[in-house]
Image (cartoon, rainbow, N blue to C red):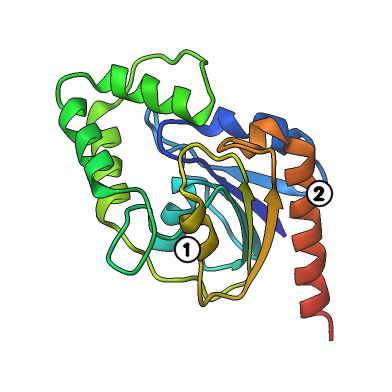
Amino acid sequence: MKLLFAHGWGFDRHFWAPLAALLPEWEHAIDDRGYFGAPVQPGVEGPCLAVTHSFGTMRVLAAPPMGLVGIVAINGFERFSAVPGRAGVPLRVIDRMLRRFETEPRAVLAEFRRTCGSDEGFGEIDAGLLHTDLLRLRDAAPPLPEVPVLMIHGGQDPLLPAAMREEAFAGADLRRMDHPEGGHLLPLEAPALCAAAVRGMAAALAERAAP
């Protein structure tokens, strides 16, 4: 089985370095959406476990690989924006970001990353692609996965409302893990915890598949 890593909005493949280093027993396929350079879309053949962060979860749900057997959704969700009867990030917050992004894309991105908990600098950006995906965060609602999901959230996440975290993946084949002190960047904040979760999910999937 291969691990497919998918990062969130405003980050790139290097986001996964601390966690991937703790999971050497599997082959890695690490995508890069291309916000800061050339995109990377690794081919995935055979069974794979998707390890996703934030908007990366929505990206995998929108185009799941053929061999997908499970998802470890870290700070993940299947819908970002609030709708009637479903908690999420208020549309007014996203719309404010979109309006400001038109004239100050780098400032909006830097502020978003700081809100998430990252002060790390970044290079040239593909503002058009970031804008496209910000619209997807506002409007998209990919279907629930047909594979088991392990969802990990931080109790101090500054981006995702508590009610949204509670309601995410309702109706899916779901197990939950919570890190009470964790924020929105758990793969960077708590890579050992995330690695243990990936191993646990892989073991559970193997047990399910055993005759």
Q: Is residue 99 left or right of residue 175?
A: left
Visible in this render: residue 63?
no
Labels 2 & 1 near each other (Cβ < 8 A): no
Mark 1 burial class by Cα count in 10 Å: few <14, some 14-19, many 20+: some
Image quadrant holding the N terminus, namely bottom right
Q: Secondary structure at mark 1?
A: loop
Residue at 77% over, 43% down: 193
Mark 2 burial class by Cα count in 10 Å: few <14, some 14-19, many 20+: few
Measured Cα–Cα span from mark 2 to mark 1: 23 Å
Residue at 60% over, 75% down: 173
Q: Is residue 104 above or below residue 201?
A: above
Amino acid at pointer 2? Ala
Q: Which residue is mark 2?
A: 196
Q: Secondary structure at mark 2?
A: helix
Give the image location of residue 33, x and y in percent: 41, 38
Q: Nearer the viewer, mark 2 or mark 1?
A: 2
Q: Which residue is mark 1?
A: 64
Q: Nearer the viewer, residue 14 or 43?
A: 14
Q: Nearer the viewer, residue 72 or 32?
A: 72
Visible in this render: residue 176?
yes
